[in-house]
Each structure stands twice: as C-alpha cells, then as structure tokens.
Image (spheres, rainbow, N blue to C red):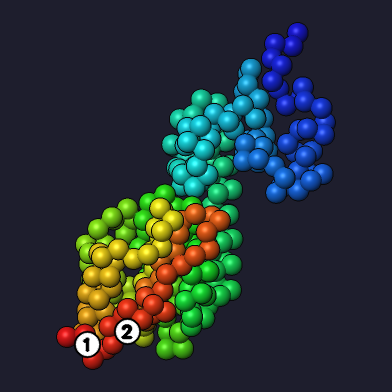
Amino acid sequence: MKTNSNLIADLPNPERPRERMQRLGAAALSDRELLAILLRNGTRGKSALSLATDLLQCYDGSLSRLAESSIHELSKTPGIGKVKATELCAAFALSARISQQECRDLPLMNNPARVASYIRRILNQREQEEFHVLLLDSRMRLIRSELITVGLLDRSLVHAREVFRAAIKEACQSLILCHNHPSGDVRPSPEDKHSTQMLRKAGKIVGISILDHVIISSRLEDLEYFSFREASIMLSDKDLK
C-alpha cells in the first residue's frame, strides 16, 4: 500500500529531476533538483527531493556553505548518512578542481581585469572575506595562489610574514593582493588602503614587488572589481620609506 504521495516515483516522468535534466539540461533545474539527482534516492517516507530541500534549509539555501561542509557535518542531516555525504563531498570537490583547472588556463596576470576574472572563480559566493595573494614569476605568469586569511574584517591585521612566506619559498618576483567584499561594494576601506601600503613597504625590504591589490564582489552576478593600480592610489616606489 502506498504510504507517501511525495515520492519522486509519483511524479509524471517528464517532471522527475533526472528526466528533466536529460530533456532540458542542468541549467533548467533548481538547486534542490540537482541535489536530488546527486542523492539518487530518499529514505522511508521521504523522497530525494524532500531530502534535498531539508539539506538546503540546514544551510539557509547557501550552496557555497553546503559545498564547504565536511562529510561529518553533512551526515548530521536526517536521511543523509555517511555514504550520501561522501558522494556529495566528492561532487563538490570535483567542481572545485574544475574551477581551479580553468583558472590555470589564465596564467598571465598582466592586467587587473584578468586578475579579477581569475580570483572571481575562487571567491564567488563566499560569505566571508578571504585574502589571497597571487604569486608571479618575472614574466607576470601565475605560479600559484595562496590563501592568507579568512573572515578577517580588519585588513590592517594581515601580517607581512604570512603574505611573503610563500612568496619567498616560491622565489617569486612579484605578487598581487586580492580579496573579496561579501557586501558587494568593491570600494576599498581605510584598512584596505593602509594594509596595502604597509605590505608594499615590507615587499621593498625583501625585494618582492606588490603590483596591485584587486577587490571583487562575492555576488555571483556582480562582475565589478576595484584595482588599486587602475585607481592610481598606490604609492610609487620612491615614496615607500
């Protein structure tokens, strides 16, 4: 006897998430439908769609928070055991690696727009501020990016030793500072300006140039960025005393 009317099997074939994706493509599906496909099946009395809804609600609908969760954290949601949690984490990890691989296709960091495009792939939809440095070789090609801090609201507390440790290890010639503003306002704060000049002075001492500081919005639809270099508010080297 049927005891639940919310099972995916009860939906008409064209309305089931898997069939909808096959017919219309992933872009036509909602977040919960895509999650339901990854979950594959529900539990007794609850469909994969219902589980997906519960899971999203646990993270206030934030896909970025969901994707950053551990297997242990995901498995706390009723109906999401270790197997489902592991499969979800594997899917999220693959997505992150694809983004990083795409970033490596843009190794030349010779203008702020290119820098913003690169860092946006890493920081899109982050709900906390993250401060990264891009380590560059003598031809302004990207060696790698380095995460320095997460959730540090006072940018003046960024320590030079943390910024330059990786740069010295990689023997890089120069670097670019990058961070996001979850608010969407890309204008630099007084702390942003102060820390930029402080770090440039430290860079002069160790022989590593800071070429720019680029700020992006965390909002997916927002392509704005702020470049200290473009805005001509970086001190010239002769002023770094």
**Quadrant of residue 149 in the image?**
bottom left
- Residue at position x 48%, y 73% from top? 115
Label 1's element?
A: helix
Numbered-mark total: 2
Say which quadrant the C terminus sits in: bottom left
Callout 2 amino acid: Ser
In the image, residue 208 above or below residue 91: below
What is the crowding at mark 1: few (fewer than 14 residues within 10 Å), some, or many (at least 20)?
A: few
What is the crowding at mark 2: few (fewer than 14 residues within 10 Å), some, or many (at least 20)?
A: many
Q: Residue furthest top?
A: 1
Label 2's element?
A: strand
Residue 127 marker: none
Instruction: Please state if 13 lies on the left or on the right of 237 as rendered.
Output: right
Which x, y percent locates residue 178?
39, 68
In the image, residue 142 above or below residue 73: below
Regarding residue 207, the answer to whether it shows in the image is no
Q: Nearer the viewer, residue 46 or 108?
A: 108
Disc 2 target residue: 209
Which x, y percent locates residue 145?
42, 70
**Quadrant of residue 37 in the image?**
top right
Q: Earlier in the sequence, mark 2 or mark 1?
A: 2
- Residue at position x 54%, y 55% from top? 220
Instruction: Please state if 183 lies on the left or on the right of 61 as rendered.
Output: left
Which x, y percent locates residue 1?
75, 8
* Of labels 2 and 1, the one closer to you: 1
Callout 1 amino acid: Asp
- Residue at position x 24%, y 85% from top? 204
Residues at marks 2 and 1 touching, judged by CB atoms closer than 8 Å: no
Disc 1 target residue: 239
Which x, y percent locates residue 66?
49, 42
